Image (cartoon, rainbow, N blue to C red):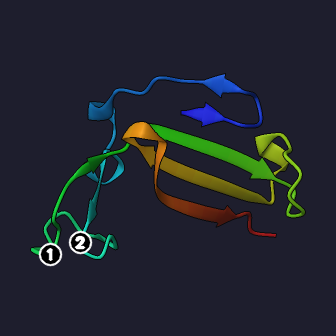
């Protein structure tokens, strides 16, 4: 896991995470589906996660001051898998 705020790189063992956080299951159109979905054609491991806390204007800030947190997950060869945006309640 790479924290863009602190530049900290942490190695997290896959078994410490739920299956949903270990793999992405795409269908034949490359859309993510649930692991149990019969349309899943492969299982791609999540090997890198980048977290970027911002002030809402795109400026990187300390995590405690962030109004928005973007989490991007990558597979092997830095393949983009999915992203999540989280907003702090005001």
Residue marked by disc 2: 27
Tell me whether the residue at label 1 lies in contact with that at label 2, contact meaning CB atoms closer than 8 angstroms.
yes
Q: Locate residue 86, reporting x and y percent.
A: 64, 63
Helix, strand or loop for disc 1:
loop
Helix, strand or loop for disc 2:
loop
Q: Quadrant of residue 12?
A: top left
Q: Residue 80 has which mark?
A: none
Q: Locate residue 63, reporting x and y percent.
A: 76, 43
Q: Is residue 70 above or below residue 41?
A: above
Residue 60 shows up from this direction: yes
Residue marked by disc 1: 39
Q: Quadrant of residue 6?
A: top right
**Image quadrant for the C terminus?**
bottom right
Q: Locate residue 80, reporting x and y percent.
A: 48, 53
Q: Locate residue 5, reporting x and y percent.
A: 77, 36
Marks 1 and 2, how far apart at CA: 5 Å
Q: Residue at x 52, y 41 (%)?
A: 49
Q: Is residue 55 above or below residue 6?
A: below
Residue 47 shows up from this direction: no
Q: Categorize mark 2 by other alpha carbons within 10 Å: few (<14), some (14-19), many (20+).
A: some
Relative to 64, 86 lies left or right: left
């Amino acid at each position: 896991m790479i924290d863009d705020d602190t530049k900290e790189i942490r190695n997290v063992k896959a078994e410490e995470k739920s299956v949903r956080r270990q793999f992405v299951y795409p269908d034949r159109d490359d859309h993510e589906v649930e692991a149990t979905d019969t349309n899943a054609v492969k299982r791609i491991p999540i090997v890198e996660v980048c977290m970027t806390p911002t002030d809402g204007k795109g400026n990187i800030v300390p995590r405690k001051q962030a109004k928005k947190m973007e989490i991007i997950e990558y597979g092997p060869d830095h393949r983009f898998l999915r992203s999540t945006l989280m907003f702090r309640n005001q």
